[in-house]
Structure formats: structure tokens, C-alpha cells
Amino acid sequence: MKEPLQPARVVAPLAALTAGLLRLFPFAGWNVAPVGALALYSGARLPWWAALTLPLGVMYATDSVLWRVAGSKPLDPYVYGTYALIALVGVALRHTRSPWKIGAGAVLSSVLFFAITNFGSWRDLYPQTWEGLTSCYIAAWPFARGTILGDLLFTPLFFGAHALLERRAAELEPAASTVVR
């Protein structure tokens, strides 16, 4: 008997590939990399160990390339920690199909990424004052558009592809009542 289609086995690798490629080759300099959307999707639709390892693995692989090619600082603990936290937000969406709840998760992911990673930048690069903190967040705002765009564009794409494959798999499964015993 043929194994039923498991949407996450199709969507997760394609989402990871998309996130990695867009991180290495950002679209028009907008810094649109759907790693947050990947983390949210992974938390919601993959086993817990894969929910953490897939987005963090994409980050590690692309960080390694970017470090060698562009000299970018790899393995930022604020970035990696935030993606792990976003995967946990995804776990809270595990049993929902609601576009509103998933959309809220995407918005929350963008806010978390902006708040936490820029707090890390403030701690590392700015004076430890209220003025330094506000300067850091103001300076970071133009870069937030790529994160927000990536999260709001790719979250419905990943979850939508999963839902379409799930529906298709349900259509292909023979009805339990037609099984001959």
C-alpha cells in the first residue's frame, strides 16, 4: 500500500531552500529572507526537533557561506535565539488552520525579530543609555522592511502550500468505508 502524501515532507525542504537562497541572494537589496516564516512554519507543522534544526540549520549553512564570501559576522546568538523562539511561536499554531492566527504569528515573529536582534545590536554597538537604545531602533527601522515583507509574504505561501497539499492528499485517500474486509 502506498504511503499517503505528507505535506510537510514536500513544503519544508522547499521552504528551507527558498529561505537559504534568498538569504544568500537578497532580492533587490531588500534583505527579504523568509527564515522567520520558515521557523514559524516548522514550529507549526514539523516535529519539535525538526522545528528547531531546520531554520537554525539554514542559518548556519548560509552564515558559513556569507562569512567566507562577505566577511559577515556569523552565529549571532540574538538572531539564532530569536529564530528558536519563533519556532516555539509556531508550536502554539500547531493545531490551527486559521489564517488570522497564522497571520498574527507572522506579525509577532517580525516584532520579536526586530525587538530582540536590535536589542543585541544596542548591547554590542551603541552606548548603554536610553538615547543609545532609541538611536539603535531608529537606525534599524529601514532594515525591518525586508524582515516584515519576508514574514508576511512567505508565511502564507508556506502554510498555504501545506494546506493545498493536505487537501490534495485527503482527496486521494480512499474512504475508510470502502475497505473490504
Image: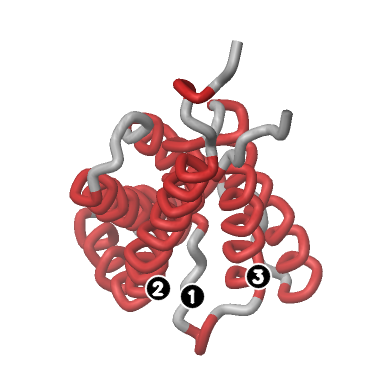
- Name the residue carrying label 3: 21
| Amino acid on which disc 1 is placed | Asn
- Classed neighbour count for the residue bearing mark 2: other residues with Cα under 10 Å, few (<14), some (14–19), many (≥20): some
Circle 1/circle 2 CB separation < 8 Å: yes
Q: Amino acid at mark 2?
A: Gly
The amino acid at mark 3 is Leu
Q: Earlier in the sequence, mark 1 or mark 2?
A: 1
**Relative to 34, residue 71 above or below:** below
Residue 47 in sight: yes
Q: Estimate the x, y position of residue 165 in percent, counting from the top left.
A: 50, 51
Residue under the image location 58 percent in, 47 percent down? 55
Q: CA distance from mark 3 to mark 1?
A: 12 Å
Give the label on residue 135, or none. Answer: none
Residue positioned 33% across, 74% down in the render: 145
Q: Which residue is mark 2?
A: 146
Residue that mark 1 sits on: 31
Of labels 3 and 2, the one closer to you: 3
Answer with mark 3 or mark 2, whichever residue precedes in sequence. 3
